Amino acid sequence: MGTTTKKELTNVIAEKLKQRQMLVRDIVQGFLDACIEELANGNRLEFRDFGVFETVSRAARKARNPKTGEVVEVPPKTVVDFKMGKRMRAIVNPGEAADEAESEEGANASAPAQPPAAPQV
């Protein structure tokens, strides 16, 4: 598993769209800057099928330094939480979609069965 950089990603997009790399780079950077600004303003970003980004406040807590065992105060902070959308989840975890379908079928099978229809005479 490797790492893809923003430059590599913009090169792939530029090639697919047959656009200049500089133009695509500016568009991608503008998109990322706008996302950061919206999250900094406390807004939730929802991209259908891709996922949802939202900020979450973490309370102050006490942690322990694993080397020294000393208790350390960790201040409160805001972090960005990401939840995958359905399409991304299906592509990233292909077996998970099959498991969900089976569990839904199992839930339907445990429902009370309909009584058979009376035979026609």
Image (cartoon, rainbow, N blue to C red):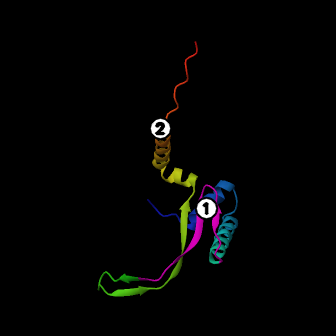
- Viewer-side residue, 39 vs 18: 39
Q: Secondary structure at mark 2?
A: helix
Residue 63 placement, left or right of 13: left
Dot 2 amino acid type: Ala
Q: Secondary structure at mark 1?
A: helix
The part of the chain drawn in magenta is 41-61
Labels 2, 1: front one: 2
Tell me if residue 97 comes above or below residue 28 in the rendering. above
Residue at (48, 52) in percent of width and height:
93
Quarter of the image for the N terminus: give it: bottom left
Magenta segment includes 45 = yes
Where's residue 86, x and y in %?
57, 53
- Which residue has dot 1 on it? 11
Neighbour class for label 1 at 10 Å: few (<14), some, many (≥20)? some
Neighbour class for label 2 at 10 Å: few (<14), some, many (≥20)? few
Residue 66 placement, left or right of 15: left
| Numbered label tally | 2
- Which residue has dot 2 on it? 109
